[in-house]
Each structure stands twice: as C-alpha cells, then as structure tokens.
Image: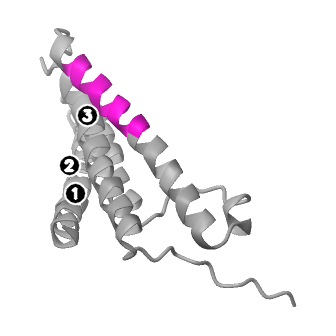
Amino acid sequence: MDGLIKKFDFLVKYICVASLTIMVLLIFVNTVMRYCINSSIVATEELCRFFFVWATFMAVIPVWREKGHIAVTALTDHLHGNFKKWFSFFWSFLILFALGALAYGSYEYIQENSYYIQITGISYGFIILPVMLSAIACFIMTVNEMLKMLTGKYQSEEKPPVTKE
C-alpha cells in the first residue's frame, strides 16, 4: 500500500505544479494583453480561482503523508510507551471521523449543487471536488497508519533532543 500511496503522491505533486503553472501563465498573459492591446481574457479570474483551490487542496495530500502540517505537541511530548501509542491511535480515530464527515459533506454538496459560474459555465461542484479527493486520500493514509500501529510496524517520528547552549 505504501508504494501506491507514493505513486499517488507523485501524481498529486505534478497536479499542483501544473495548476500553479497554468495559473501564473494565465495571469501573465492577461496582464500583457491588458497593457499592450487593451483587451483581456474574461475568464482568467474564474479559472485562476479554480486552479488555486485545486492546487491548495491537492497539496494537502503530500503534506499529510510527510506529516508536514502544524502540530501542537505540548501533551504528546510528555507521553511514552504504550500510552503514547494508544493516545495516537485514539486521535487518529477522531481524525478519521472528521475526514469522513468532510468527504461525505463535499460529496453531498457536489450531488445537490446546480449552480454554475457565470462566465465559464463550470459547476461549483468542480471547486468542491478537490476537497473530497484530499479528504479521501488522507482518510486512506490514516487508516494505513492505524493498521501499522496495530501490527507494530509503525515507528513514530521522534524529534531529536534540543540542546541548550
């Protein structure tokens, strides 16, 4: 499963790079056109908004896998052994509940949504799709991590000790 997650992570990073590249190119071309020929692409703002949302929510996936998100560890730094393991398992279970609610809510929004953006005609559901995809991907990674905790194959990332000078 780790190999599949790494391949998916690689694909997601390229989606993020492509989204940001297209967004920058659209804005650049629109700016040049506006100042050189007094005309612009009308749909640029909406398309850039879509690409920005997609890049942002898809970037959650590799950050989640690498544990690069902000974490407050004031309590967990003082826990040790099995208690720390079960505490992490409990919080992972709560995270699964939150991710499931987010995925289900975004799915319901996509199903019930009938609004379209005025200029491009793209459905608002398209802007919610990356929320659902990132929630599902993070859900799968969290389940994989919990299975590793239960089987004993999980090594928590211990921080190196801080030296006082």
- Would you place residue 103 above or below residue 95 in this image? above
| Magenta-colored segment: predominant secondary structure | helix
Mark 1 vs mark 3, CA separation in Å: 16 Å
Nearer the N terminus, badge 1 or badge 2?
A: 1
Residue 127 lies in quadrant: top left
Q: Quadrant of the N terminus?
A: bottom left
* Residue 39 visible in the shown view: no
Which numbered disc covers residue 12? 1
Q: Secondary structure at mark 3?
A: helix
Question: Would residue 101 be found to the left or right of residue 90 on screen?
Answer: left
Whether the magenta-drawn stretch holds residue 47 is answered as no
Where residue 121 sits in the image (x, y, percent)?
12, 17
Label 1 crowd bin: few (<14), some (14–19), many (20+), radius 10 Å: some
Find disc 3 in the rendering and name its residue.
50
Amino acid on which the number 3 mark rests in the picture: Phe
Residue 9 lies in quadrant: bottom left
Of circles 3 and 2, the one toward us is: 3
Part of the protein shown in magenta = 97-110
**Nearer to the camera, 85 or 113:** 85
* Residue 63 visible in the shown view: yes
Nearer the N terminus, badge 3 or badge 2?
A: 2
Residue under the image location 16 percent in, 68 percent down: 7
Where residue 54 sits in the image (x, y, percent)?
27, 41
Residue under the image location 31 percent in, 47 percent down: 139
Q: Quadrant of the C terminus?
A: bottom right
Label 3 crowd bin: few (<14), some (14–19), many (20+), radius 10 Å: many
Which numbered disc covers residue 22? 2
Residue under the image location 29 percent in, 33 percent down: 103
